[in-house]
Image (spheres, rainbow, N blue to C red):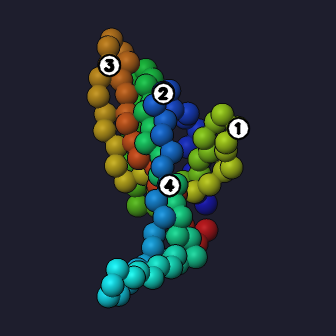
């Protein structure tokens, strides 16, 4: 069973959508496109988490445990439906004192649950 990521981003959350299309181009500028699979539209979130070092270490550990699989997460602000995501890229940096931040990219996972 997948773990649930419970931390919410502190600022600068950006949701992007990356539709996947197959296309073929013909002469005279014609092009035909169709969705690439049944889950052709994926959400991609760029997130920043700024917390005390102990929480940042816990977040880093979570990402290390789950980088090869998916986890459950929902964005706060009432937009949220619990969905499955992967996090294959994150960066840590100190802020000040005992505060640090992680910037991460969450990509909606479309595999079998």
Q: Which mark is residue 13?
A: none
Q: Which residue is mark 4?
A: 17
- Whether 13 is drawn above or below 35: the answer is above
Q: Which mark is residue 78?
A: 1
Q: For this rendering, which residue is in front, 112 or 21? A: 21
Q: Position of residue 9 (x, y in %)?
A: 51, 32
Q: Position of residue 70 (x, y in %)?
A: 51, 58
Q: Residue at x 43, y 20 (%)?
A: 52
Q: Position of residue 33 (x, y in %)?
A: 47, 79
Q: Earlier in the sequence, mark 2 or mark 3?
A: 2
* Marks 1 & 3, CB-CB < 8 Å contact: no
Q: Earlier in the sequence, mark 1 or mark 4?
A: 4
For residue 40, side relative to residue 79 (left or right)? left
Q: Spatial distance from mark 2 to mark 1, Cα to Cα?
A: 16 Å
For residue 98, side relative to residue 7 (left or right)? left
- Whether 26 is drawn above or below 42: the answer is below
Residue 65 in sight here: no
Q: Secondary structure at mark 2?
A: strand
Question: Which residue lies most toward the front here?
Answer: 28
Q: Nearer the viewer, mark 1 or mark 3?
A: 1
- Whether 94 is drawn above or below 44: the answer is above
Q: Spatial distance from mark 1 to mark 3, Cα to Cα?
A: 29 Å
Q: Which residue is mark 2?
A: 11
Q: Which residue is mark 3?
A: 95
For residue 91, side relative to residue 75 (left or right)? left
* Marks 1 & 4, CB-CB < 8 Å contact: no
Residue 24 in sight here: yes
Q: Quadrant of the N terminus?
A: bottom right
User: How would you rate the neighbour count of disc 1 (Cα within 10 Å): few for under 14, some for 14-19, many for 20 or more?
Assistant: few
Q: Quadrant of the C terminus?
A: bottom right
Q: Earlier in the sequence, mark 3 or mark 4?
A: 4
């Amino acid at each position: 069973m997948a773990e649930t990521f419970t931390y919410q981003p502190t600022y600068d959350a950006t949701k992007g959508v990356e539709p996947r299309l197959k296309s073929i181009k013909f002469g005279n500028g014609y092009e035909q496109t169709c969705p690439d699979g049944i889950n052709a539209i994926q959400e991609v979130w760029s997130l920043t988490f700024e917390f005390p070092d102990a929480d940042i270490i816990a977040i880093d550990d979570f990402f290390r445990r789950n980088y090869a699989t998916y986890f459950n997460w929902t964005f706060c602000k009432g937009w949220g439906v619990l969905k499955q995501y992967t996090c294959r890229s994150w960066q840590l940096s100190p802020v000040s004192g005992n505060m640090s931040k992680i910037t991460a990219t969450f990509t909606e996972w479309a595999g079998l649950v």
